[in-house]
Each structure stands twice: as structure tokens, then as C-alpha cells.
Amino acid sequence: MLLRTLLALTLLSVAPIVPATAAPGGCSGYVALTYDDGPYTDFTRPLLAALRASRARATFFDIGSRAQQHPDLVRAKVRAGMWIANHSFSHPFLTRLTPDELTKEIADTQAALRKITGRTPTLFRPPYGDTNAAVKAEAERQGLTQVLWTVDTLDWSGKSTEEIVRSATSATAGGIVLMHDGHQNTVDAVPQIVRGLRAKGLCPGRIVDGRVVAP
């Protein structure tokens, strides 16, 4: 009995102490990878493959009209473990619309994505980040949390893969990275982004009520 007690005390003395606040899987925090404007026939599947190969999940803010044109790609995102969110129906400047037009842009996208996936989106991102109190209030009225970003990679503007990676990996815990579903350099950047974030102790996370949490 004495020998077993001494052995147990020895093991406790050398065992690593894990802080109670440590995130699962060795992550010290989470960053949300987000992709706007899809789906795209040329890029969505390769992007999903890159994310899955990197064991990363992301949030896709899809355009309602494009989702209707390519429902199979939206369903592929869901099967890959991604989260689908509302990015308006036709990608207009929402602050320039009438109240009825604004309501329709958001509602039609909700209906389209719900029909395709069987799930009702809970997140909304206004195109171009063009928002005001009326846009935010209408999104909330339809059960949506408005989500913007903390890091803009500007990947749509012809940035190189290296530039996209550098921008994305500058994110800190709780950050939300804006990218787009529709650019080869963005697809190519995925493994380096995930590695770069993990080197900082950060892991891809999920957006819940505007906060980035464990997936």
C-alpha cells in the first residue's frame, strides 16, 4: 500500500498541469474563417477539399440567388461540416434599398437556404459591409445576428496567396477573417492559414451570437 501511494505521488509530481481555462485540443483561442459570395462551380469544391484536408471548418455567407442556381454546392458545404449563413439574395448595397426591398433580400435568402439545407441560417453579413441601424434591425427581426469581420484579406482584389495568408494569420483570438468563395489564391491559402494560426495556438472556430467559439 505504501509503495502504491509513493508511486501515485511521484506520477502526480511529473504529470503536466493543464490550466482549467485551456481550450480543447491545445487551442488557446479560436478564429472564424469566413467565405462570402458563393457558391461557385469552379472553386467551391476545391475550397471544401482544402478545408477538410486541413481539418478546418468555416462559415460560408452565401448569396441566395447563387444558392438557388447551385443547390448541390450548398449541400456539399453542409456535408463537409461547414456552416451556411445569409449574404442577401442579389448582393446589393442594402442601405440604399426601401424597407420592403431590404426585407425581401434577407427573407428570400433565408427561404432559399432553408429549402436547400433543411436548416434556418442564424447569421447574416451585409454585402460590402454596408449596414446601418435599419439593416441590423431587420436582420434581427428575421432571427439573424449580423456579423462583420476583424480582418479583411482583400482576396477579391487579386492578392497573392502569400498576401492572403499574411493577412489571415494576423488574426487574434476571437477574430473573424473575411475571404471569398471564388478565387484560386484563396483556395491555395487554406493550408498555410490553418498552419499559421495553429502555430499561434489558434484554431478555426464557429460564430455563435457574434462570438467565436469552439466548433
Image (tube, rainbow, N blue to C red):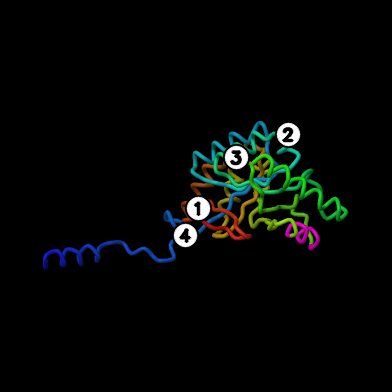
Residue 183 point in image, percent of width and height: 66, 38
**Which numbered marker is on residue 69?**
2
Residue 84 located left or right of residue 56: right
CA separation in Å, label 3 and label 4: 27 Å
**Which residue is labeled 4 in the image?**
28
Query: Looking at the image, which is closer to me, 31 or 200?
Result: 31
Secondary structure category for the residue under label 4:
loop
Of the image marks 1 and 2, the number of the one nearer the N terminus: 2
Residue 137 lies in the magenta-colored region: yes
Alpha-carbon neighbours of circle 2 within 10 Å: few (<14), some, or many (≥20)?
few
> Number of labelled discs?
4
The mark closer to the camera, 1 or 2, is 2
**Which residue is labeled 3 in the image?**
77
Would you say the residues marked 1 and 2 are in contact, meaning their CB atoms lie under 8 Å apart?
no
The amino acid pointed to by label 4 is Ser
**Which residue is labeled 1 in the image?**
203
Secondary structure category for the residue under label 2:
helix
Q: Residue at x 69, y 43 (%)?
A: 113
Query: Looking at the image, which is closer to me, 58 or 149?
Result: 58
CA separation in Å, label 2 and label 4: 40 Å
Q: Residue at x 64, y 46 (%)?
A: 119
Residue 145 visible in image: yes
Residue 179 point in image, percent of width and height: 65, 46
Of the image marks 1 and 3, the number of the one nearer the N terminus: 3
Query: Looking at the image, which is closer to me, 48 or 185?
Result: 48
Q: Residue at x 54, y 36 (%)?
A: 49
| Residues shaded magenta | 133-140
Of the image marks 3 and 2, the number of the one nearer the N terminus: 2
